[in-house]
Image (cartoon, grey):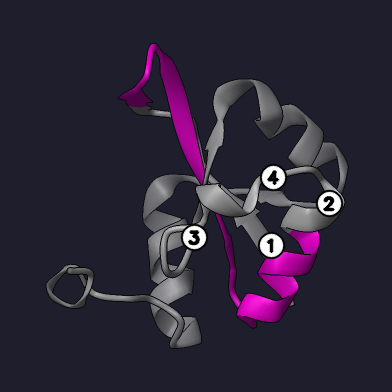
Amino acid sequence: MTVLVDEPRWPAHGRLWAHLVSDDSLDELHAFARTHDVPARAFDLDHYDVPEDLVPRLIAAGAEHVDGKELVRRLIASGLRIPARDRR
């Protein structure tokens, strides 16, 4: 069971954003997000979008910092990944 966060590389709303995922369960992901004040509106089917300034605090709280490819690989392996074709 691990919560993962990648590099903030995605620009939106004047900020850079990272992804927060679990490689085990959405329950684990939601609990971690709630505990660390990540708003529920940041959830996007299989991940949370988190702003760059929050990433160091999430890592300090136990999220494993990985690159984007590793995050996606582990999310797919967990069975929690929602493919792009199923997003809309």
Mark 2 vs mark 3, CA separation in Å:
17 Å
Q: Quadrant of the C terminus?
A: bottom left
Label 2 near label 4: C-beta < 8 Å?
A: no
Per the image, the residue denoted by label 4 is 38
Mark 2 vs mark 1, CA separation in Å:
8 Å
Per the image, the residue denoted by label 2 is 62
Q: Nearer the viewer, residue 12 or 73?
A: 12
Q: Quadrant of the N terminus?
A: bottom right
Per the image, the residue denoted by label 1 is 3
Amino acid type at circle 2 is: Gly
Rendered view: 29 above or below 7: below
Q: Earlier in the sequence, mark 2 or mark 3?
A: 3
Q: Identify the magenta region.
A: 11-32
Q: Earlier in the sequence, mark 4 or mark 2?
A: 4
Q: Most extreme residue toward the bottom, as rendered?
A: 79
Rendered view: 19 above or below 57: below
x 69%, y 45%: residue: 38
Amino acid type at circle 4 is: Val
Q: Nearer the viewer, residue 77 or 31?
A: 31
87 to the left or right of 18:
left
The image quadrant of residue 61 is top right
Amino acid type at circle 3 is: His
Helix, strand, or loop for circle 3?
Answer: loop
Q: Which mark is residue 47?
A: 3
Helix, strand, or loop for circle 4?
Answer: loop
Q: Earlier in the sequence, mark 4 or mark 1?
A: 1
Q: Residues within 10 Å of mark 4 (few under 14, many from 20)?
A: many
Mark 3 vs mark 4, CA separation in Å:
11 Å
